[in-house]
Image (cartoon, grey):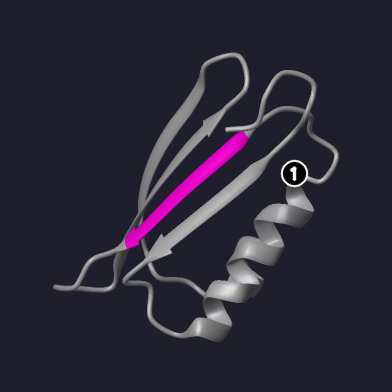
Amino acid sequence: MAGVGSDQMVVEMQNTGDPGLQREVVATIEHVLSDRAGDWRFSIVGSQANDRWEMKIFGPNAFERSLLWREVPVSTVRK
């Protein structure tokens, strides 16, 4: 991660299928967090057995979340 005083966002995606969808997901995350300070790291891993994705989010002040969901269109996520 970046050093003190600089902000960084890292989005890692694996086994999520369509590269166009991956770009949309990254762009959406970047847009949503564009006004948030601090270092953010997203790990999104798609299952090879089904259409579920697991997302882990790490942020400033020990922020940490883990989510599991079925693949949904990015337009649904933006609402």
Provide residue 72's location: percent of width, then percent of height: 47, 71
Query: Crowdedness of circle 1 by 10 Å Cα count: few (<14), some, many (20+)?
Result: few
Q: Residue furthest left?
A: 49
Vertical relation: 77 (above or below) 37: below
The verdict on residue 58 being magenta is no
What amino acid does circle 1 point to?
A: Leu
Can residue 79 be seen at all in this image of the molecule? no
Give the residue displayed 57% in from the left and 33% down from the top.
1
The magenta-colored residue range is: 40-45
Main SS of the magenta part reads strand
Front residue of this view, candidates 1 and 74 = 1
Give the residue displayed 50% in from the left and 83% down from the top.
19
Provide residue 36's location: percent of width, then percent of height: 79, 34
Q: Residue furthest top?
A: 61
Q: Secondary structure at mark 1?
A: loop
Give the labeled residue for mark 1: 33
